[in-house]
C-alpha cells in the first residue's frame, strides 16, 4: 500500500509548487487535491460534518491548475483530483485539461470525480440537483469518448455533442485511471457501471468493508481503492491495508509553508516507522 498526501490547496496555505516538491522529496506517492469553485452564502445544504463550512472550501485553487503546476516540478508522484465536481464542469473542457496534465506529467494523472453535496453550489453552475447523478454518468462516458476516439462524439440525455476533434489525447492507454468518490449505494453502482476505482473518505473500517464488498461483488473482482483524507493513524492504516487499499492520501491541513513542511516531515517519519 502506497501513501500520498491529500489536501485543499488554498490561497493562504503552502503554495502548490513548494508542496509538490516537498511531497516527492519525502517519498510520498501522490498528491490529491480537492475542488470547490465557490461556496454559496445560503445554508440550505448542511455541511456534512456539521457546523459552518470551513473557509478552505471556497479558498481552494482550481485542481487542474494546481496539478499542472505540480506536474511541472515533479517526476514521479501521481496527480489526482480528489474529487473534481464533474457535474459542475463542461466535459469537453475537463477532458482537455485532464489530457493536458497527463501529457505534461508523462502519464501521471488520475481523474477522481464526484457529484458533490452542496445543492446551492450546483444550481449556481446551472446544474439541476435532481439530475446530477445522470449528468455525472454521462460526463464520465463523454470524457472517455473524448480521450479514446477521434473524431469523438457523445449523445446522452444531458450531455450531447456531434463528432469533433480534440487533442491532446492522454499518454496513458486506454486512458488515465478514473476514480469515483462517494459513500452511497449509488456510488457502488457507479463504480461498477464505469469499471472505475473508488476514492473514499475516511469511513469506519466496517463501513469501508461493506461498500468494498458490494463493489467487488458487482464488478466480479477487485476494484482499485484509494482514499482522500486518511488520518495519520497506523492502526487505521493497517485496517485499510487488510481491505485492499492501493493508496491512502494522508490529510494535510491547509496551513502555511513552514507548518505544512513540518507536518510532512512528521508524516514521512510515521510512514517509515509503519513500514
Image (cartoon, grey):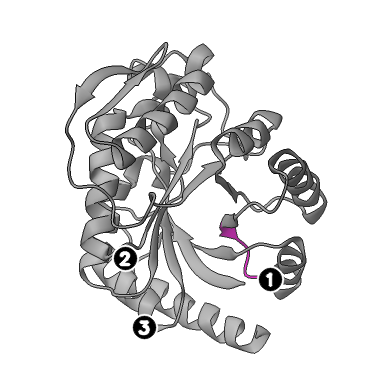
**In 3D space, how far apart are the residues under numbered discs 2 and 1 (Cα atoms)?**
23 Å
Q: In the drawing, does residue 152 fall left or right of residue 4?
A: left
Residue at image point 34% right, 22% down:
154
Instruction: Find residue 200 and report its horizontal and vertical position in percent.
Output: 61, 49
Image disc number at residue 14? 2
> Which numbered disc, 1 or 3, marks the residue closer to the eye?
3
Give the Cα separation between the discs numbered 1 and 3.
Answer: 22 Å
Relative image position of residue 236 (x, y in whole percent)? 73, 66
Look at the picture and state if 241 lies above or below 96. below
Give the crowd class for mark 2: few <14, some 14-19, many >=20 residues within 10 Å: many
Mark number, residue 25: 3
Assess whether residue 40 is covered by the magenta stretch.
no
Compared with 79, 44 (above or below) is above
The reply to whether residue 38 is visible in this rendering is no
Is the residue under label 1 in contact with that under label 2 (CB below 8 Å)? Answer: no
Mark closest to the chain's N terminus, 2 or 1? 2
Disc ID at residue 164: none
Kindly identify which residue carries mark 1: 233
Any part of residue 78 in sight: yes
Instruction: Specify few, some or many for label 1: CA neighbours under 10 Å numbering under 14, 14-19, or 20 or more.
Output: few
Q: Quadrant of the C terminus?
A: bottom right
Q: Position of residue 180 (x, y in %)?
A: 54, 41
> Does residue 170 appear to the left or right of 116 in the view shown?
left
State the extent of the magenta-drawn residues as a range: 228-233
Query: Front-most of 189 and 79?
Result: 189
* Residue 229 is inside the magenta segment: yes
Kind of element beneath mark 1? loop
Q: Secondary structure at mark 3?
A: helix
24 left or right, relative to 233: left
Query: Residue at the location (61% across, 35% down)?
Result: 48
User: From the viewer's perspective, is residue 73 above or below residue 168?
Assistant: below
Amino acid at each position: 500500500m502506497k501513501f500520498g498526501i491529500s489536501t485543499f490547496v488554498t490561497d493562504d496555505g503552502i503554495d502548490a509548487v513548494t508542496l509538490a516538491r516537498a511531497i516527492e522529496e519525502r517519498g510520498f506517492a501522490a498528491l490529491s487535491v480537492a475542488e470547490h469553485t465557490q461556496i454559496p452564502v445560503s445554508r440550505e445544504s448542511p455541511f456534512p460534518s456539521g457546523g459552518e463550512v470551513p473557509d478552505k472550501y471556497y479558498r481552494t485553487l482550481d485542481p487542474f491548475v494546481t496539478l499542472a503546476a505540480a506536474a511541472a516540478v515533479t517526476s514521479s508522484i501521481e496527480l489526482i483530483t480528489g474529487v473534481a465536481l464533474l457535474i459542475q464542469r463542461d466535459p469537453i473542457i475537463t477532458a482537455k485539461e485532464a489530457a493536458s496534465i497527463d501529457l505534461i506529467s508523462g502519464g501521471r494523472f488520475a481523474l477522481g470525480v464526484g457529484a458533490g453535496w452542496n445543492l446551492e453550489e450546483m444550481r449556481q453552475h446551472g446544474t439541476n440537483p435532481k439530475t446530477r447523478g445522470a449528468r455525472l454518468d454521462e460526463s464520465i462516458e463523454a470524457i472517455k469518448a473524448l480521450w479514446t476516439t477521434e473524431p469523438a462524439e457523445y449523445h446522452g440525455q444531458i450531455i450531447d455533442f456531434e463528432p469533433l476533434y480534440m487533442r491532446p489525447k492522454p499518454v496513458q492507454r486506454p486512458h488515465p485511471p478514473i476514480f469515483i468518490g462517494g459513500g452511497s449505494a449509488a456510488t457502488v453502482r457507479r463504480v461498477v457501471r464505469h469499471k472505475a476505482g473508488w476514492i473514499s473518505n475516511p469511513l469506519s473500517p466496517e463501513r469501508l468493508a461493506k461498500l468494498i464488498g458490494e463493489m467487488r461483488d458487482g464488478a466480479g473482482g477487485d476494484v482499485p481503492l484509494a482514499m482522500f483524507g486518511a488520518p495519520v493513524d497506523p492502526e487505521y492504516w493497517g485496517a485499510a491495508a487488510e481491505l485492499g487499499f492501493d493508496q491512502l492520501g494522508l490529510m494535510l491541513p491547509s496551513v502555511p509553508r513552514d507548518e505544512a513542511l513540518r507536518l510532512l516531515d512528521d508524516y514521512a517519519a510515521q510512514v517509515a516507522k509503519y513500514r
